[in-house]
Image (cartoon, coloured by chain):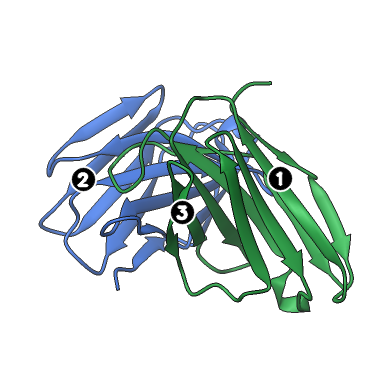
Chain colours: A green, B blue
Amino acid sequence: ETGVTQTPRHLVMGMTNKKSLKCEQHLGHNAMYWYKQSAKKPLELMFVYSLEERVENNSVPSRFSPECPNSSHLFLHLHTLQPEDSALYLCASSPLAGTYNEQFFGPGTRLTVL
Amino acid sequence: SQELEQSPQSLIVQEGKNLTINCTSSKTLYGLYWYKQKYGEGLIFLMMLQKGGEEKSHEKITAKLDEKKQQSSLHITASQPSHAGIYLCGVTSGTYKYIFGTGTRLKVLA
């Protein structure tokens, strides 16, 4: 595997379910990100991890819980979501956080909340 | 907070035609990224501009940064169906703040 991978690619869940999204980067980067992309809205940054430490949390509801066990893996734990949380969730990584450098994106997880 | 507005929102062109997409910032631009996204997939980095007046090219795509106008433009020469997708501009706005534009959806007719 190369680049940034995300699993699953598609997820349908009920509002009472608990699920997790997984992201893995094979690029040796030190920063990882979660973004949310909803229809007709700009891409929204949710969380930033730098060297496995969360450095940014953009007022994201607590029903989204990120976890970064090491610099290669990032998870987004989901529980009691709402239908408006349905979106494409993108993971990205970059060599460093907080500076101008290219982010490498995964293919995304298409989440549908029923 | 900084906002990026892209124009046009969508564009349909005939193959072989040239086109330009603009990205205008509500604040001073110190640098800017351009990405391309295929529908429902991740973003692919195109180029990064870091200085006023800077111009970069990648294959048939050229981007310029105009600091005074707080604007960047992306120009595609002799468009091809492979250029179709959503083009997004983005900036690093403060420490750990990444902001993206609303996107321009491009369709190229063969």
- Image point (67%, 47%), residue name: B39
- Of tags 3 and 2, the one toward the viewer is 3
The answer to whether tags 1 and 3 share a subunit is: yes
Instruction: Name the amino acid, label 2.
Output: Leu
Q: Nearer the viewer, residue A80 or B23?
A: A80
Query: Is residue B99 shown to the viewer in this render?
Result: yes
Residue annotated with mark 1: A22
Task: Decide if residue B42 is on the left or right side of residue B50.
Answer: right
Calculate the distance from the C-alpha at mark 3 to the C-alpha at mark 2: 27 Å
x then y, percent, for residue B65: 21, 45
Q: Nearer the viewer, residue B97 or A76?
A: A76
- Label 3: which secondary element: strand
x then y, percent, for residue A3: 59, 27
Instruction: Name the amino acid, label 3.
Output: Val
- Label 1: which secondary element: strand
Considering only vertical position in the picture, is A105 above or below A2? below
Say the numbered circle drawn on residue A83: none
- Image point (70%, 63%), residue name: A87
Pointers 3 and 2 in contact (CB under 8 A)? Answer: no
x then y, percent, for residue A95: 39, 33
The answer to whether tags 3 and 2 share a subunit is: no
Query: Which comes sooner in the sequence, label 1 or label 3?
Result: 1
Calculate the distance from the C-alpha at mark 1 to the C-alpha at mark 3: 15 Å
Instruction: Name the amino acid, label 1.
Output: Lys
Task: Decide if residue B50 is on the left or right side of residue A52.
Answer: left
Q: Quadrant of residue A8?
A: top right
Chain of residue at mark 1: A
Q: Quadrant of residue A89?
A: bottom right
- Label 2: which secondary element: strand
Say the numbered circle drawn on residue A48: 3
Residue annotated with mark 2: B65
- Image point (40%, 61%), residue name: B7
